[in-house]
Image (tube, rainbow, N blue to C red):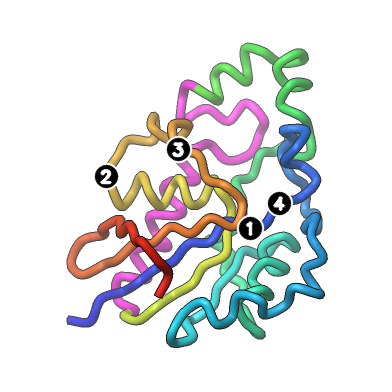
Amino acid sequence: MQATRLTLIAHAPTCARKPARFALDESLQMDWQQARLSQAQRFKRAPRLLCGPEARTRQTAGLFGESAQVEQALRDCDLGRWQGMAIDAIQHAEPEALQAWLTDSTAAPHGGESVAQLCERVAQWLGTLEQAPGHVLAVTHPFVIRAALLHALQCPPAMFNRIDVEPLSSTELRFNGIWRLRLQTRET
């Protein structure tokens, strides 16, 4: 059985990062058009390139290849009415709701998707990759990468907020009967 290699790339920074604001569908801070294909030679063989539907993931995918396939399962967590809001503003206006969302993985006080729902969506998508051997490069969001890690390591959703995912970071998972986290010393 040939293994599935999944490289998850967190999208490059947007203007939402510095003020700690939940992102809208916004472009990258960097000149992504000038940087197009700058990471295309990062892997020996070109992987199948997937990305979320948002501008920031599509633009980041352009650093790695010409034609990324948009995968809806890689979309960011739906944060409902909190979309575009600064975390400090939410803390001030809705402290109990924010606390519930941070501590209860089934809570969705913003009217969008709960952490548990996000984790289930990502787990279902990972299940589709189990039958698709080869290398997949998926450009997505930190929340999606957290959910994938929880699934691979069989951790409860309560561990979601204990994982930090930096912009343009790379996380590799392998499937050969079970999902494994693979830590590397260099990219290949």
Q: Amino acid at mark 3?
A: Ile
Q: Secondary structure at mark 4?
A: loop
Q: Is residue 127 magenta?
A: yes
| C-beta proximity under 8 Å, tags 3 and 2 | no
Residue wearing tag 3: 163
Q: Is residue 131 above or below residue 86?
A: below
Q: Secondary structure at mark 2?
A: loop
Residue wearing tag 2: 154
Q: Secondary structure at mark 1?
A: loop
| C-beta proximity under 8 Å, tags 1 and 3 | no
Residue wearing tag 1: 11
Of callouts 4 and 2, the N-terminal one:
4
Of residues 186 and 154, the one nearer the viewer is 186
Identity of the residue furthest to the front in this view: 185
Which one is closest to the eye, mark 3 or mark 2? Answer: 3
Please give the name of the residue rendered at 66% of the width and 13% of the height, measured from the top-left corner.
Answer: 95
Q: Quadrant of the N terminus?
A: bottom left
Residue wearing tag 4: 13
Q: Can the viewer see residue 34 in this picture?
A: yes
Near mark 3 (Cα within 10 A), the count class, few <14, some 14-19 or many ≥20, is some
Q: Which residues are magenta?
A: 103-132
Q: Secondary structure at mark 3?
A: loop
Q: Amino acid at mark 4?
A: Pro
Q: Amino acid at mark 1?
A: His
Q: Amino acid at mark 2?
A: Gln
Which one is closest to the eye, mark 4 or mark 2? Answer: 4
Q: Is residue 114 magenta?
A: yes
Of callouts 1 and 3, the N-terminal one:
1
Q: Can the viewer see residue 69 in this picture?
A: no
Near mark 1 (Cα within 10 A), the count class, few <14, some 14-19 or many ≥20, is many
